[in-house]
Amino acid sequence: MLLVVVIIGVLVSVAVPRFSVSFDSMKAKSGAYDVAATLDYARATSILEGRTLRFEAAASGTEVRVTEERAPADRKAFLPLVRPLPDGVRVVVIDFADALVAGRGYVDFRPDGGCEPCTLKVLGVSGEEYDVQVLRGAMHATVARRRPDE
């Protein structure tokens, strides 16, 4: 009986750390998909409402939001969307394909659904990195895990 308890204890001590790393990885992936869904929401809403909407990450990178670039005087103001990311997950950088808008910390979606193509880097608590891409002609943002050697 004591031998069975020792064996179970050893198995549990090996399995528990793997579960925590796996859980952190799932949070990072979930955060990347949250960012992609928020980008898709911004694009779709800008088309439906005929407004220029802005997607941006908070300075801390722990939440993303969609706001109206400029509210016209003749229209009801857009109600901003604020979405916190899972604990330990943050947006670290927005890379634009066009050098003219490089360094900008937001993405504007025009009423035709257009925007500047960009890649957002999402970082997890255990160092996992995901790329969330917004392409010029695509209607949905895509998510891909970044490999450590890239």
Image: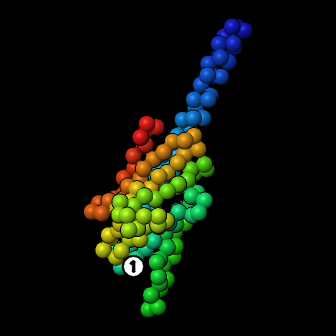
Residue that sits furthest to the front in the current view: 99
Residue at image location 69% in from the left, 12% down from the top: 6
Give the quadrant of residue 14: top right
Residue 37 in sight: no
The N terminus is located in which quarter? top right
How many C-alpha atoms fall within 10 Å of the one at disc 1: few (<14), some, or many (≥20)? many
Residue at image location 41% in from the left, 71% down from the top: 108
Question: How far across and how far down the image is residue 111, in percent?
Answer: 34, 76
Q: In the drawing, does residue 66 fall left or right of residue 51?
A: right
Q: In the drawing, does residue 80 fall left or right of residue 135?
A: right
Task: Identify residue for label 1.
Answer: 51
Residue type, numbered disc 1: Arg
Residue that sits furthest to the left in the current view: 137
Give the quadrant of residue 96: bottom left
Whether 61 is drawn above or below 115: the answer is above
Residue that sits furthest to the bottom in the current view: 74
Q: In the drawing, does residue 146 fall left or right of residue 27?
A: left
The C terminus is located in which quarter? top left
Whether 85 is drawn above or below 46: the answer is above
Residue at image location 57% in from the left, 40% down from the top: 126
Whether 125 is drawn above or below 115: the answer is above
What element does badge 1 sit on? loop
Residue that sits furthest to the right in the current view: 2
Question: How far across and how far down the image is residue 109, in percent?
Answer: 38, 71
Whether 44 is drawn above or below 35: the answer is below
Residue at image location 42% in from the left, 43% down from the top: 145
